[in-house]
Structures are given as C-alpha cells and as structure tokens.
Image (tube, helix red, strand yellow):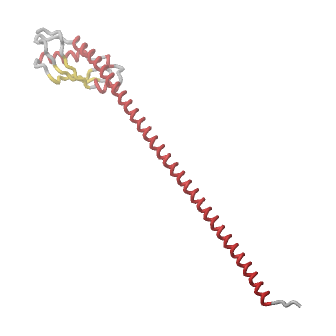
C-alpha cells in the first residue's frame, strides 16, 4: 500500500490556495491599476475638454468684445460723420439765410431812399445808423437813431423816410427763423450815394 503523506498534501493544498490567492490578489491589483489608469485617463480627457471649452468661451468672449468695440467705433464714426454733415448743413443754411437777408436789406434800403426827402444841408459822405423794430408782417413798429451823422436835419430826414415807408412787404411770408435772426431788430446804415459835395 502506498503511503499518503497528509502533511505534504496539506502543504501542497495550502501552497495551491496561497498561489490561487496571490493570483487573485494580483488580478485585483491589476484590475485596480487599470481602473485607476482609466479614471486618470478619463479625468485627463475631461480636463482637456474643460480647457478646450474654456478656451472656446474665452475666444467667444474676445470676439464679442471685439465686435462690440468695432460696433462702438462704427457708431462713433457715424455719429461724427452725421455731426459734421449737420454742421455743414447748418453752415450752408446760415450762409444762404445771410445772402437772403442781405438781398432783403438792399431792398429795404432802396425803399427808404425812395421815401427820403433830401434836406438842403445834406452832403456827400453823410451817413447815420438806424435801428428798426419790425414785426413779421413787415410793419415798422419803431425806428431810432443809433449813431448820428452830426447833422440833425439829415438824421431826422432818414428817420422820417423809414416812417414814411411804414411797411416792407418783402418780409411777409419770410422764414420765421430768418426774420427773428436778421429783421426783428434791424440795423441799417443810411448812406445815400446821390448827394452833392
């Protein structure tokens, strides 16, 4: 009969169990290591994606800011352009109004000269400055001498010529802005050119 060494059998069984346990632990360690590596890889991928999204968001914000600045600059340029255009229009309108006013002043001066009765003492070079107060109908409501010629008869004759004219119909229907600016209070230098020496 063959002798079975129980102690050896137990040792062999214990070694086999130990070996199996070691294999199991090694497999668990490997699995844990793979799991950690996968988690690390996943975390790195997530971080990479977050960085990509953050960079994308930053680029989007920069693009929006640039767009806002460009729009602001464009708006400012447009505002400046329209301001310059408006100023130019106002200047042209002012020049046009000035020319209109000058033509009306010439007509008014002619009408005053037509109504003027020359006093015997009037001489070439005499002139006086008159201030006319007018209403939009062209009616003279007041006339006064601002600066006399030094000859009372000449000054009085100029004042009477304005009163005789009484109304300047040319002013009727005039643009109210032009009237208020140039004709509400009108200064005229009365300086007739057909006087004797």
Locate the N terminus and report the quarter of the image it occupies.
bottom right
Residue 180 lies left or right of residue 144; in this view the side is right
Q: Quadrant of residue 170?
A: top left
Identify whether 148 is placed above or below 122.
Answer: below
Q: Which residue is painted at 74% across and 83% down in the image? A: 15
Q: Quadrant of residue 180?
A: top left
Who is closer to the viewer here, 99 or 83?
Answer: 83
| x, y percent for residue 108 | 26, 16
Locate the C terminus and report the quarter of the image it occupies.
top left
Who is closer to the viewer here, 46 or 86?
Answer: 46
Q: Tag count in the figure?
A: 0
Q: Quadrant of residue 164?
A: top left
Residue 59 lies left or right of residue 126; in this view the side is right
Who is closer to the viewer here, 68 or 162?
Answer: 68
Q: Which residue is painted at 22% across and 20% down in the image? A: 188
Q: Which residue is painted at 28% across and 25% down in the image? A: 184
Residue occupying the far front of the picture: 1
Residue occupying the far right of the picture: 1
Q: Which residue is painted at 72% across and 81% down in the image? A: 18
Who is closer to the viewer here, 77 or 103?
Answer: 77
| x, y percent for residue 17 | 75, 81
| x, y percent for residue 103 | 29, 17
Residue 131 lies left or right of residue 96; in this view the side is left
């Amino acid at each position: 009969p063959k002798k079975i060494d129980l102690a050896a059998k137990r040792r062999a069984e214990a070694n086999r169990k130990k070996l199996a346990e070691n294999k199991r632990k090694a497999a668990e360690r490997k699995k844990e290591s793979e799991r950690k590596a996968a988690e690390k890889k996943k975390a790195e991928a997530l971080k990479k994606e977050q960085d990509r999204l953050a960079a994308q968001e930053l680029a989007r914000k920069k693009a929006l800011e640039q767009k806002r600045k460009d729009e602001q600059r464009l708006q400012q340029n447009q505002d400046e352009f329209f301001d310059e255009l408006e100023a130019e229009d106002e200047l042209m309108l002012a020049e046009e109004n000035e020319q209109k006013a000058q033509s009306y002043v010439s007509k008014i001066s002619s009408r005053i000269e037509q109504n003027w009765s020359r006093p015997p003492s009037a001489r070439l070079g005499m002139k006086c400055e008159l201030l006319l107060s007018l209403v939009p109908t062209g009616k003279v409501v007041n006339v006064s001498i601002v600066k006399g010629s030094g000859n009372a008869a000449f000054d009085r004759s100029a004042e009477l010529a304005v009163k005789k004219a009484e109304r300047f119909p040319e002013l009727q229907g005039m643009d109210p802005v032009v009237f208020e600016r140039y004709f509400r209070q009108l200064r005229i230098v009365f300086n007739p050119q057909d006087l004797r020496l």
